[in-house]
């Protein structure tokens, strides 16, 4: 039987702003993941390596995200998500985790993280909730562990 819970309890309740495009969301999510690993600011070079993008492009996007108050950026000191940026990143991570878990547990197909992110970003909130209801247990080894305090993905955190 699938776990029932409210996605608002786990990060899925924060709406993705219509003004945020898929690429900006990917940067935001990567900043969140990297900064969550050791609770520090993320250097643009580290973010560039994570995303496989040129450092100049990263600096440009970080400046853009900073202008929307989704990240705090200090030149030569790195970048970190704001409270609003964190909430949106957690929602994006929840969506990705649900998609990865759904494909694995329901369809028996291992989907890569980038494809899962794109699907999760594109689907409406209600569709993600429906996918989540079909997932009996998350695929923990495929999901990013974005909740350092619990050491698990959002779907896992719901089942606890």
Image: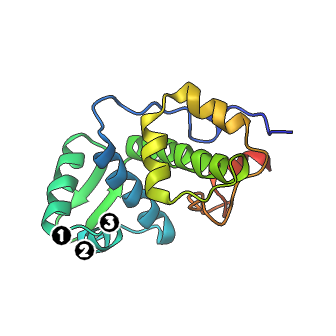
Of mark 2 and mark 3, the one earlier in the sequence is: 2
Tell me the distance, in whole angstroms, between the alpha carbons under discs 2 and 3: 10 Å
* Residue holding disc 3: 51
* Residue holding disc 1: 55
Neighbours of disc 1 within 10 Å: few (<14), some (14-19), many (20+): some
Asked if residue 67 lies left or right of residue 155, the reply is left
Is residue 105 or residue 136 the one in the foreground?
Answer: 105
Residue drawn at 50 percent across, 69 percent down: 37
**Residue with the most extreme top position:** 126
Asked if residue 159 lies left or right of residue 68, the reply is right
Q: Is residue 143 visible?
A: yes
Q: Could you say whether the residue bearing mark 3 is in a helix, strand or loop? A: helix
Asked if residue 5 lies left or right of residue 21, the reply is right
* Residue holding disc 2: 45
Of mark 1 and mark 2, the one earlier in the sequence is: 2
Tell me the distance, in whole angstroms, between the alpha carbons under discs 1 and 2: 6 Å
CB contact under 8 Å: marks 1 and 2? yes
**What percent of the width, then of the height, locates residue 31?**
37, 59
Q: Could you say whether the residue bearing mark 2 is in a helix, strand or loop? A: helix
Residue drawn at 69 percent across, 58 percent down: 139
**What percent of the width, then of the height, locates residue 19?**
27, 31
Neighbours of disc 3 within 10 Å: few (<14), some (14-19), many (20+): some
Q: Quadrant of residue 34?
A: bottom left
Is residue 98 or residue 64 the one in the foreground?
Answer: 98
């Amino acid at each position: 039987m699938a776990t029932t819970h409210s996605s608002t309890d786990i990060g899925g309740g924060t709406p993705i702003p219509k003004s945020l495009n898929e690429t900006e969301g990917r940067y935001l999510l990567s900043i969140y993941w990297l900064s969550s690993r050791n609770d520090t600011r993320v250097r643009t070079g580290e973010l560039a390596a994570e995303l496989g993008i040129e450092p100049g492009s990263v600096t440009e996007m970080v400046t853009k995200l900073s202008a929307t108050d989704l990240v705090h950026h200090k030149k030569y000191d790195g970048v970190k998500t704001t409270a609003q940026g964190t909430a949106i990143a957690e929602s994006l991570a929840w969506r990705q985790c649900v998609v990865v878990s759904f494909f694995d547990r329901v369809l028996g197909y291992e989907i890569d993280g980038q494809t899962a992110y794109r699907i999760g970003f594109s689907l409406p909130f209600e569709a993600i909730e429906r996918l989540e209801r079909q997932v009996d247990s998350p695929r923990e080894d495929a999901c990013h562990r974005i909740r350092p305090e619990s050491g698990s993905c959002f779907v896992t955190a719901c089942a606890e």
